[in-house]
Image: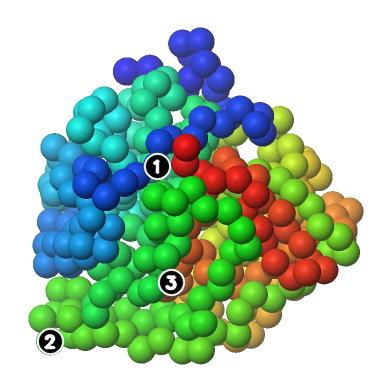
Amino acid sequence: MAGPVGSSGGTAGGVGAGAFVKPPRLRPGDTVCAVSLSSGAAARFPDRYRRGRRQFEEAFGVNVVEAPHALRDDAWLYAHPEARAEDLHWALENPEVRGIVSVIGGDESVRILPHLDHELIRAHPKPFMGFSDATVTLTAFQNAGVVAFHGPALMTDLAEAGGIKPYVRRSVSRALFEGWTGPLEHSPEWTEQFLDWGDPAVADRPRTFLPSEGPVWLQGGSAVTGRLTGGNVEVLEFLKGTPWWPRPESWEGVVLCLETSEEAPPVTLVGRFLRNYGSQGILERAAALLLARPMRYSAEQHWRLQEEALRVLAEFGRRDMPVVANLDLGHTSPQTVLPFGCMAEVDPVGRRVVLLEPGVA
């Protein structure tokens, strides 16, 4: 298999703004492929997986098929990273498949990258959606110059007990099916409650959602535009220093979107991650910073994370950068869908984030 795209004539480590291919939009009746590029959670919690598949099919009128190894268990998937990459290749090359959605995250899909043919992604652009450890694949798509979608997985918001939340359904439809542009909508409610997927007594119980206070605008005096990129901040650490880390010019003018996992990394550690972005010159190049609502943080930790981000930006002379926190991204429910590779406006005066171009053709 080919390595990073540059090894066989493409553009390793990312492409410049404006060079992104937009995959064809999904339509009712299309076939969408479920892929497990890291975790074997579908084998551990088959009922949860089946509900996500069913609800996704019913909500959007699509047909979901599994990649050849998508329902394998954790041990098998861990032992065969090359097979996980082959599953993505299978979905890309299969003419029946029109889109790809991640089953769940994990913690080591970075191991598929040596086996991944980035040129195949460019040659067969299809909507890919996922988050958390799927940040690896989202980055691979961007390195190949193809728009990718940071959004819910089949076993998370799409398998919500009681049905997919209207906010999630609307966001997925807009991003993958409609090619929508406009101001990001913010969910009126949120939760991080976890009910044991393996316990029949609670697995089907609807979760408790709380009123959302909405986004928190931290700094910035004027509107900026830039290309959306980013993902899970811990997973992005796996890529730093590797051939798959985006080239310096790929960060020029980006709107950097970062979220933290259920492991709730210490605020000081997140600050160190951000300081590394500054040391690389990324904070100097970036146009704006979007921070997700962090999971399993206390109210004090929420505040400290915001203060830490501003402190690091100040260290690198970026008190001018628009920063908004507490967004409905990543490890929060319900979560929105962002088309990475597309242009957006971040307006701290009007207090809105606006998608300027659709993610699908």
Image coordinates of residue 272 in percent, x first then y, are: 67, 57
Dot in front, 3 or 2? 3
Badges 1 and 2: C-beta atoms under 8 Å apart? no
Whether 358 is drawn above or below 17: the answer is: below
| Identity of the residue drawn at 26% across and 25% down | 93
Image coordinates of residue 182 in percent, x first then y, are: 61, 58
Would you identify the image quadrant in which residue 53 lies?
Answer: bottom left
| Identity of the residue drawn at 51% across and 44% down | 359
Label 2: element kind: loop
- In this view, the residue in front, 338 or 58, is 58
Mark pair 3, 2: CA separation: 27 Å
Mark toward the start of the polypeptide (3 vs 2): 3
Mark toward the start of the polypeptide (3 vs 1): 1
Residue matched to label 2: 201
Q: Any mark on residue 161, and which?
A: none
Residue matched to label 1: 25
- The three-letter code of the residue at mark 1 reads Arg
Q: Is residue 314 visible?
A: no
| Identity of the residue drawn at 22% across and 51% down | 62
How many labels sit on residues?
3
Q: Residues within 10 Å of mark 3 (few under 14, many from 20)?
A: some
| Identity of the residue drawn at 69% across and 76% down | 216
Mark pair 1, 2: CA separation: 39 Å
- In this view, the residue in front, 107 or 157, is 157
